[in-house]
Image: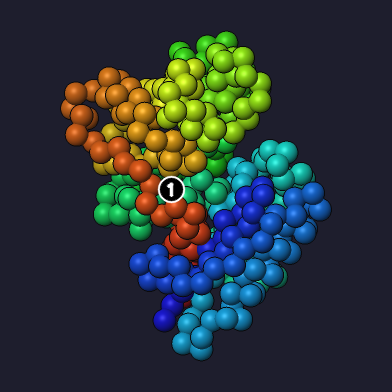
C-alpha cells in the first residue's frame, strides 16, 4: 500500500498524518509548535513527528514523501518561506523544503497551510468531484484558495488567497492586521467580530468569538449585530469572488464556520444579493474534513509531485 505523510504546521500546533488512498488518514501525531525556540526547533519537531509515524507503519506501507502545509507565504520554486507573521519568530526565509528533504531523506513539498486546507477539501472533502473549487476560511484571519483540476492557484509570489485583504464597505476606516484599513478581515474575522461587539456593548471583557456567538444565541442584540456583520461582510466578498471566478462550488471553513445559523444566514443572504443571477445555483457549503483538511491536502501535494517526477 502506498501512502504519504501530510503535515499541518501552524503557529501553536504541528499535526502530522499518514494518508492513504482516498485521503484517508491512517495514523496521526501532533505536538505544540516550539515557536519561541526558533525555526530550527520547529523543523526538528516536524522531523520527530514524521519519524514517529514512519516507525509505526507496517511493512506493507510504502511512503512516497512528505507534504507540508506551513504558515506563511511559500515560494513555489524554492519551498522556502517568503513572508511570515510574528506567530513564528524568524520563520521568514526558512528553507523548509531543503531542510526537511535532507533530514527525512525523502521527497518533500511545501505549500501555504490554507492552500493545503483548500486542496484537501477540493480533492477529498466538500469539493470532491468538482473541477473548480473556491475555498474561503474565516477564523483568526480570512483566507482561502482557488483549486482548479486538483491544483492550487498560488499566484506569482504565492500570495494568492489573501481574501481577507479585499476592500469591504463594512470595514471602511477600520484598521486591518496587514497595516492597511477597510479590508474585509477587519470585520469578518473572529477577533474583528469581538472588537465590533466590544464597541457596541461597551463590554471590554469579551475576547473570544465563541462568547459573542453564545451571547447572540441567548438574545444579546449587540452580539447578534456583530455576528450578522461578520457573516454578511464575508458573504458579500464571496458573492464578488463568485462573479469574478465562477467556481463549481464554494467551501467555507475555519473557526467561524461553526458560528451558527444566524452567521450562515447572513453570509448566504449577502452572497446571494451580490452574485450575478446566472450564478444563483452555485452551492456554498461548509467544509467537511475538519482538522484533517490541511494534512490530507499536503499529502496529496507530495503524492502528485512524486508522480510527476521523471523516471
Is 268 situated left or right of 308 in this image? left
As helix, strand or loop, the secondary structure at mark 1 comes to: helix
Residue in the foreground of this view, choosing between 126 and 69: 126
Question: Can I make out residue 195 in this image?
Answer: yes
Q: Establish if 145 lies above or below 241.
A: below
Please give the name of the residue rendered at 51% of the width and 89% of the height, measured from the top-left corner: 59
Please give the name of the residue rendered at 53% of the width and 35% of the height, measured from the top-left corner: 210
Where in the figure is residue 244, as x and y percent of width and height? 33, 28
10 Å crowding of disc 1: few (<14), some (14-19), many (20+): many
Residue in the foreground of this view, choosing between 75 and 26: 26
Where in the figure is residue 97, as x and y percent of width and height? 64, 59
Q: Establish if 15 lies above or below 191.
A: below
Residue 43 position by quadrant: bottom right
Is 31 situated left or right of 242 in this image? right
Residue 158 position by quadrant: top right
Q: Establish if 307 lies above or below 158.
A: below
Tally the marks: 1
Question: Can I make out residue 165 in this image?
Answer: no
Where in the figure is residue 155, as x and y percent of width and height? 49, 40
Q: Residue furthest bottom?
A: 59
| Residue at mark 1 | 118
Please give the name of the residue rendered at 47% of the width and 50% of the height, measured from the top-left corner: 117
Q: How is the image coloured?
A: rainbow
Tell me the quarter of the image containing the N terminus.
Answer: bottom left
Is 184 situated left or right of 249 in this image? right
Please give the name of the residue rendered at 59% of the width and 78% of the height, measured from the top-left corner: 54
Amino acid at each position: 500500500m502506498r501512502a504519504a505523510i501530510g503535515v499541518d504546521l501552524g503557529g501553536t500546533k504541528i499535526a502530522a498524518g499518514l494518508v492513504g488512498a482516498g485521503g484517508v488518514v491512517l495514523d496521526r501525531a501532533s505536538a505544540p509548535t516550539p515557536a519561541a525556540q526558533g525555526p530550527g526547533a520547529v523543523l526538528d519537531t516536524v522531523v520527530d513527528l514524521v519519524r514517529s509515524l514512519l516507525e509505526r507503519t507496517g511493512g506493507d506501507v510504502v511512503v512516497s514523501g512528505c507534504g507540508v502545509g506551513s504558515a506563511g507565504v511559500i515560494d513555489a520554486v524554492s519551498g522556502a518561506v517568503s513572508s511570515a507573521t510574528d506567530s513564528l519568530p524568524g520563520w521568514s526565509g526558512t528553507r523548509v523544503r531543503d531542510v526537511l528533504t535532507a533530514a527525512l531523506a525523502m521527497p518533500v513539498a511545501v505549500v501555504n497551510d490554507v492552500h493545503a486546507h483548500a486542496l484537501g477539501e477540493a480533492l477529498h472533502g466538500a469539493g470532491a468531484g468538482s473541477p473548480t473549487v473556491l475555498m474561503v476560511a474565516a477564523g483568526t484571519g480570512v483566507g482561502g484558495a482557488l483549486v482548479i483540476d486538483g491544483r492550487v492557484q498560488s499566484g506569482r509570489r504565492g500570495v494568492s488567497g489573501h481574501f481577507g485583504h479585499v476592500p469591504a464597505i463594512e470595514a471602511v476606516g477600520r484598521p486591518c492586521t496587514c497595516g492597511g484599513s477597510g479590508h474585509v478581515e477587519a470585520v469578518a474575522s473572529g477577533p474583528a467580530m469581538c472588537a465590533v461587539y466590544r464597541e457596541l456593548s461597551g463590554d471590554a471583557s469579551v475576547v473570544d468569538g465563541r462568547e459573542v456567538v453564545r451571547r447572540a444565541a441567548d438574545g444579546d442584540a449587540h452580539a447578534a449585530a456583530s455576528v450578522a456583520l461578520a457573516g454578511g461582510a464575508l458573504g458579500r466578498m464571496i458573492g464578488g469572488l463568485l462573479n469574478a471566478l465562477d467556481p463549481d462550488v464554494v467551501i467555507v471553513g475555519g473557526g467561524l464556520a461553526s458560528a451558527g445559523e444566524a452567521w450562515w444566514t447572513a453570509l448566504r443572504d449577502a452572497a446571494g444579493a451580490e452574485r450575478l443571477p446566472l450564478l444563483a445555483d452555485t452551492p456554498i457549503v461548509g467544509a467537511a474534513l475538519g482538522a484533517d483538511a490541511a494534512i490530507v491536502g499536503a499529502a496529496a501535494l507530495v503524492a502528485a509531485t512524486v508522480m510527476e517526477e521523471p523516471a
